[in-house]
Image (tube, coloured by chain):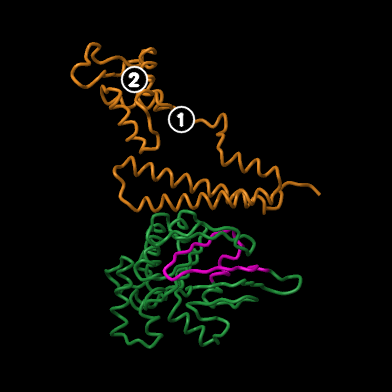
Amino acid sequence: MTAMLEFDDVVKSFGSGATEVRALRGVTLSVAPGEFVAVMGPSGCGKSTLLHLAGALETPSAGAISVGGKALARLDAAGRSELRRRDVGFVFQRLNLIPALTAIENVMLPLELTGEPGRTARPRAIEALEAMGLNEQLDRYPDDFSGGQQQRIAIARAVVGERRLLLADEPTGSLDTASGDEVIELIAALPERHGTAVVLVTHEPRFASWADRVIFLRDGRIVDETPAIAAASR
Amino acid sequence: MSVREGLLALLADGPRNGHQLKVEFEAVTGGVWPLNVGQVYTTLDRLARDGLVTRARPDGDDDGTGKLYQLTAAGREELAGWWQLVPAEDPPPRDELMLKVLFATTLGPTHALNVITEQRTALLALLQGHRRASRAPADDVTSAMVRDALVVRAEADLRWLDLCEARFHAPPKGRSR
């Protein structure tokens, strides 16, 4: 089976010479389709860099990355944008919803960017929002929703259109524990519901424990990981 | 706490025989503290010796319920004192994980970090197990509370390991030139 995400001895450095900082120092990692992997580690260990590389927001200094079998090094800027529009969804700690668009318009946006007409994008957006437990007053603006609800809108936007890889960077960071639990539970249901692979960066064991596998980074290296949990025993 | 306090607490609800106390003790503790009925009767004998319980019907063993025990006034007083007793930190808790990491630290930061990493991975795997178990509805409220306790304690241990690791990375404080 082709891995959904593959890192092969990936190195990422920022700066050069005396000011060079090595954020990742040879990371090899494979995430299967429909697998939920959490990445943990202390601040500055390279967790977010790993996520940015996986989403083609950064390019590695050495090593190879592929998403759904596509080698990112072979994609030009347009190809990387296409990948982010069609295959990869992002959720960040900051909600990044567009305040001038309603909840449903925010979720329709990535579909419309791929050229999908509004008449088909709208029901798909509603479906994605309903899967996140939101089915009322979807024509309200983000500020009218609670923090937890806004994060659920952001996740709906990240996965709408059957994107196969969700990259989530501390998505519960701005939420209280109860809202964070709800958001992680919804994220954890994505692999089974849609076959979405999920990579979650978090410093909270509480949220990482929902994952099939937890990877620990230190100083830009993977130092350990929990045994993978088979989908059947989730 | 010991079995003794648990039995006193159960008897506050009315007379019980040894078998009932064993079953209720195990149910209340969510299955984390199995007892054999011999332990229960040994403890009841000691409680009776100390005047904290008494046989409800000294002659009654012929109605199928076995020997029934009930609290005495002294037993109620002892139990009231236990409800009010707050856990103390003197002496400090001799926690296995804490002691392991403390001893590992004496062998240098690299060894300590390796031990922390292994313990963290194992604890996270344990937490994953608790999480999967918690997706099934709990049989009753005490089982749910036991699950919550296991999850929260594993989280606390993991948080402590994070703090330990951060101490190895933090510059030493208060050191003069």
Which chain does the residue under circle 2 lie in? B
Which chain does the residue under circle 1 lie in? B
Residue B8: x percent and y percent?
Answer: 35, 23
**Residues behind callouts 2 and 1 on a single chain:** yes
Residue A103, compared with residue A112, is above or below; it is: above
Residue A75: x percent and y percent?
Answer: 54, 85
Q: Amino acid at mark 2?
A: Arg
Mark 1, residue position: B86
Would residue B97 be found to the left or right of residue B145 on screen? right
User: Regarding mark 2 in the picture, which secondary structure is present there?
Assistant: helix
On whether residue A121 falls in the magenta region, the answer is no
Residue A30, compared with residue B123, is above or below; it is: below
If you read the primary sequence from the N terminus, does the residue marked by circle 2 or circle 1 appear first?
2
The image quadrant that residue B83 belongs to is top left
User: Which one of the lettered chains is coloured orange?
Assistant: B
Q: Which residues are magenta?
A: A22-51
Q: Amino acid at mark 1?
A: Val
Q: Could you classify mark 1 by the number of other residues whose Cα lies within 10 Å: few (under 14), some (14-19), or many (20 or more)?
A: few
Mark 2, residue position: B76
| Label annotation for residue A92 | none
Colour given to chain A in the rendered image: green
Q: Could you classify mark 2 by the number of other residues whose Cα lies within 10 Å: few (under 14), some (14-19), or many (20 or more)?
A: some
Q: Residue at x 45, y 55 (%)?
A: A209
